[in-house]
Image: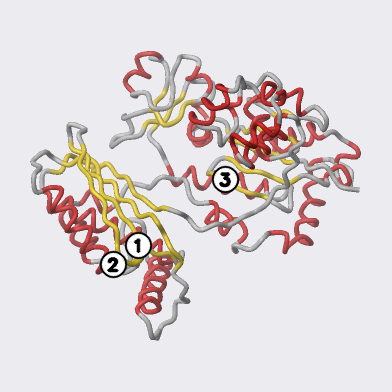
């Protein structure tokens, strides 16, 4: 007999703000928001539920947040701590399922399809989910919410509907649960598709379910049929762990102060290009296109792009193009530089294995970058790398503020999260026996009969 899919979505509540409260328990019970920018007082990048009651939203200026909630607390971001707490949360979650698919720093999916055979015979799914949440709250000090349903998309909608806390969409009730929910709530439905559905009279999933399936197929193709099945509660989607190559890599950094010396800004740009290209080589990728955007102190911008004839991975080639592009953009400018954004896209595989004595440029560059990365990991420190490029060394000698560079955005690609969790890109089902032992141990600790 085919088992019904039971997919759990877990999401950290107001994650960055919750992390700050976990780091400083005295903040509990107070409105808290996290500010970005140079000094942590730019725009709001996260706010807890108490702060949101005062109308504080992501993207709002921090001074406006303080005006609306004078008694609230502004916290500067601590990205390294957010990563640490995220890792601890996921290490707990991976003990409850053979398949865990992280999708961001604070959310992921678990396959609980066969739990009714192993664990749920003497309890209820909802009680089990709440026990997981209570354990994360107890051990990591982070509140989480979750949704359980027959597919990942429906589980995410259930999480949104049940926050704060956990919500199950029992088998057979999917259509009723979706009936009055707007279609825009589902991931993958952007403004254009929302407007196209609205033109057909479909604003809710109930409206979609009432339309002829062939009409949706003619209008949207296979996606239209899937949407119709989903709206009718008939979309049973298994959870798959897919480790895909990234499609782009970028960096956006606000300088410590408005930089009037364009040569200094160029040094920073070349240093960032070296860092990004090194990451691409470690992932065995190369870039076909790049883009550079420079924002000035009055928030005006200039930018340009370049397309290589062939995908590139060599710093000597890429940095020359970045420098030429930078100088061309700045030749007509005079305003101080506030922010630099650099991006590489149209990525292609670099199918080489790093070897110390390779016969090709790709092998030699790959080996050099791999060795440099290992040396920095083993012997370097955040404020004192073991190895640096010429641009990075010159930048640090020019300005002491770059000796401790700002932590980058904590969001990492799914394949990197998978590798950190399991030490490999392979499907964790390969370790099913180990997982079953872990599950038994966790069940006993949680008081559930085996």
Give the spatial CA distance, label 3 vs label 2.
31 Å
Depth check, front residue: 357 or 383: 357
Mark 3 or mark 2, earlier in chain: 3
Q: Nearer the viewer, residue 316 or 441?
A: 316
Q: Seen in the image, is 388 located left or right of residue 241?
A: left
- Local crowd size for mark 3, using a 10 Å CA cut-off: few (<14), some (14–19), many (≥20): some
Q: Which numbered disc flags the more N-terminal residue, 3 or 1? A: 3
Query: Which residue in the protein does label 3 denote?
Result: 103
Residue 444 appears in view: no
Q: Tags 3 and 2 in contact by the CB under 8 Å rule?
A: no
CA neighbours of label 1 inside 10 A, class few (<14), some (14 to 19), many (20+) = many
The kind of secondary structure element at disc 3 is strand
- First-in-chain label (2 vs 1): 1
Q: Are marks 2 and 1 in contact (CB under 8 Å)?
A: yes
In the rendered image, residue 139, in percent from the top left (x then y), is placed at: 64, 41
Q: Residue 447's spot in the image, x, y percent?
A: 83, 40
Q: Is residue 297 left or right of residue 375?
A: left
Residue occupied by mark 1: 277
Q: Residue 29's image quarter?
A: top right
Q: Is residue 57 visible?
A: yes
Quick check: 28 left or right of 311? right
Left or right of 349, for residue 309: left
Against 393, is 3 above or below?
Answer: above
Residue at position x 72%, y 23% in the image: 210
Relative to 103, say whether 344 is above or below: below
Picture residue at 35% right of the left edge, 55% below the top: 344
């Amino acid at each position: 007999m085919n088992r019904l899919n039971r997919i759990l979505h877990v999401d950290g509540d107001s994650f960055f703000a919750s992390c700050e409260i976990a780091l400083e328990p005295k903040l509990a019970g107070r409105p808290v928001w996290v500010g970005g920018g140079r000094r942590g007082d730019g725009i709001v990048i996260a706010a807890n539920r108490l702060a949101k009651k005062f109308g504080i939203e992501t993207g709002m200026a921090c001074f406006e947040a303080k005006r609306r909630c004078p008694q609230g607390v502004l916290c500067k971001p601590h990205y390294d701590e957010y990563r640490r707490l995220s890792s601890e949360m996921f290490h707990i979650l991976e003990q409850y399922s053979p398949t865990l698919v992280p999708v961001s720093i604070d959310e992921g999916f678990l396959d609980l399809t066969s739990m009714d055979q192993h664990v749920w015979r003497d309890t209820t799914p909802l009680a089990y989910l709440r026990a997981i949440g209570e354990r994360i709250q107890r051990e990591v000090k982070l509140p989480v919410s979750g949704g359980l349903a027959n597919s990942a998309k429906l589980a995410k909608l259930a999480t949104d509907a049940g926050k704060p806390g956990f919500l199950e969409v029992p088998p057979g009730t999917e259509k009723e649960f979706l009936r009055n929910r707007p279609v825009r709530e589902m991931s993958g439905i952007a403004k254009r598709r929302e407007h196209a559905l609205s033109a057909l009279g479909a604003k809710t999933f109930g409206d979609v379910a009432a339309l002829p399936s062939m009409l949706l197929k003619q209008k949207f193709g296979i996606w239209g049929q899937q949407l119709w099945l989903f709206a009718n509660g008939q979309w049973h989607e298994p959870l798959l762990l897919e480790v895909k190559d990234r499609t782009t890599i970028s960096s956006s950094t606000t300088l410590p102060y408005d930089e009037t010396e364009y040569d200094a800004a160029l040094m920073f740009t070349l240093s960032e290009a070296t860092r990004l290209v090194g990451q691409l080589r470690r992932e065995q990728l190369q870039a076909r296109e790049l883009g550079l955007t420079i924002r000035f102190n009055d928030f005006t911008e200039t930018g340009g792009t370049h397309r290589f004839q062939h995908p590139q991975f060599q710093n000597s080639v890429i940095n020359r193009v970045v420098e030429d592009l930078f100088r061309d953009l700045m030749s007509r400018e005079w305003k101080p530089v506030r922010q630099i954004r650099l991006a590489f896209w149209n990525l292609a595989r670099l199918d080489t294995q790093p070897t110390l004595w390779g016969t090709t440029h790709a092998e030699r560059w790959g080996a050099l970058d791999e060795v440099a990365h290992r040396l920095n990991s083993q012997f370097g420190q955040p404020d004192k790398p073991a190895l640096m490029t010429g641009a990075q060394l010159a930048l640090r000698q020019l300005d002491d503020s770059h000796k401790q560079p700002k932590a980058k955005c904590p969001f990492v690609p799914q394949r990197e999260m998978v590798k950190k969790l399991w030490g490999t890109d392979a499907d964790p089902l390969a370790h099913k026996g180990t997982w079953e032992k872990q599950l038994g141990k966790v069940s006993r600790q949680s008081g559930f009969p085996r």
